[in-house]
Image: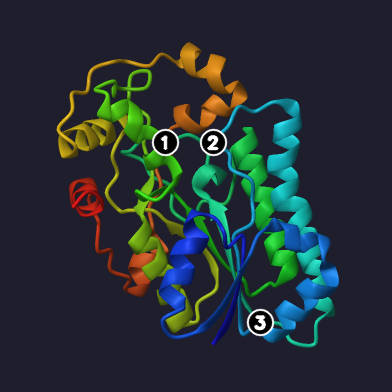
Amino acid sequence: MKILILGGTGLVGKALVSHFALNHEVKALGRGIYNQQKLLKEYIEWSDLLIQLSGATIAKRWTKKYKEEIWNSRIKTNQKLAKIYNQSYNRPKLICASAVGFYPESNCKKPFDESYKKPGSDFLSILADNWEQEMLNISSKALIFRFGVVLSKNGGALKEMLPMYRLGAGGPIGDGAQCFPWIHIQDLVNAIQFGIDKNINGIYNLTSPDLINQKDFGKALSKTISRPFFIKTFPWQLKLLFGEGSEVLLKSLAVSPKKLLKHGFKFNFANIDSALKDLFK
């Protein structure tokens, strides 16, 4: 296949390029391509599969200006893409990234699956809901994956956490009871390949079936790298650092990948110990 990955220069994009380049022709582009609409149209018409990953990171301090960037990098880019895609003579299969932030808060004993349709009322939920609507405006047959926290040593949340944990400064965030939805990078890549092979569409949660809270995740990480786990981070400290963006770390999200499991997808790393052991081998 000819595969076009938008947002292909980030953590997930790079992993997908490495995976697909073995057997397919792949082009990976950053968000700058949206300023070159004629060229983007040519790339879309060239491709058999379009994977849309574009979006500014949410792991920063949320000023009013940066919240606009988070929003525009997902909503306005997809609005531009919809216009170009629907003007193209060739309309490739579309796979898009969304996020489990769509769901309202919940605890690990009561996870939400894809049958739950009502988003939460916070910024992350409103963002994901609008984001997905724009994706469906591109193609009603889009395959949309709601990603959990992607675990990889090459970037993302785990790479940001590691320096403090290696210094022995890891510990629970608040009481540590908030459910922590995660996915090993290889299972994410495999799930996208699975979606292609099975030719499925619609919305799918892409998180490990192993539901754990933040405290248990931190303990598992500390154990894996042989460091202590005891220095508590208080919510007010996070709010000083990240402002409203602290909700990324404080929101409890319990999510089940029910549809993927029903289709027969097998997770290679279904529990946190096996995932971390693989990442640090």
Pointer 2 with pointer 1, Cβ within 8 A: yes
Decide which of 223, 106 is in the foreground and name it: 223
Question: Which residue position holds label 3?
Answer: 92
Residue displayed at 33% across by 19% down: 175
Residue 97 locus on image (x, y percent): 56, 59
Q: Which sits in the foreground, 241 or 263?
A: 241
Up/down of 112 relative to 31, above or below = above
Q: What residue is disc 2 on?
A: 59
Name the residue type under label 2.
Answer: Ala
Q: Residues within 10 Å of mark 2 (few under 14, many from 20)?
A: some
Which image quarter: residue 159? top left
Which residue is located at x 56 percent, y 45 percent? 102
Residue 147 horizontal/vertical position (percent): 47, 53
Residue 199 at x, y = what percent? 50, 82
| N-term mark: 3 or 1 | 3
Considering the numbered disc 1 on the image, is that residue within a helix, a strand or a loop? helix
Q: Residue at image x 31%, y 34%? A: 213
Callouts 2 and 3 close, C-beta under 8 Å:
no
2 or 3: tag closer to the N-terminus: 2
Q: Disc 2 to disc 1, how far (Cα)?
A: 9 Å
Location of residue 111 with respect to 193 vertically, above or below:
above
Residue 249 as seen in the image, left or right of residue 143: left
Residue at the (66%, 82%) spot, across then down: 92
Q: Is residue 177 visible?
A: no
* Image location of residue 42, percent across then percent down: 77, 80
Q: Residues within 10 Å of mark 3 (few under 14, many from 20)?
A: many
Numbered badge on residue 124: none
- Image quadrant holding the N terminus, namely bottom right
Q: Which residue position is annotated with label 1?
A: 160
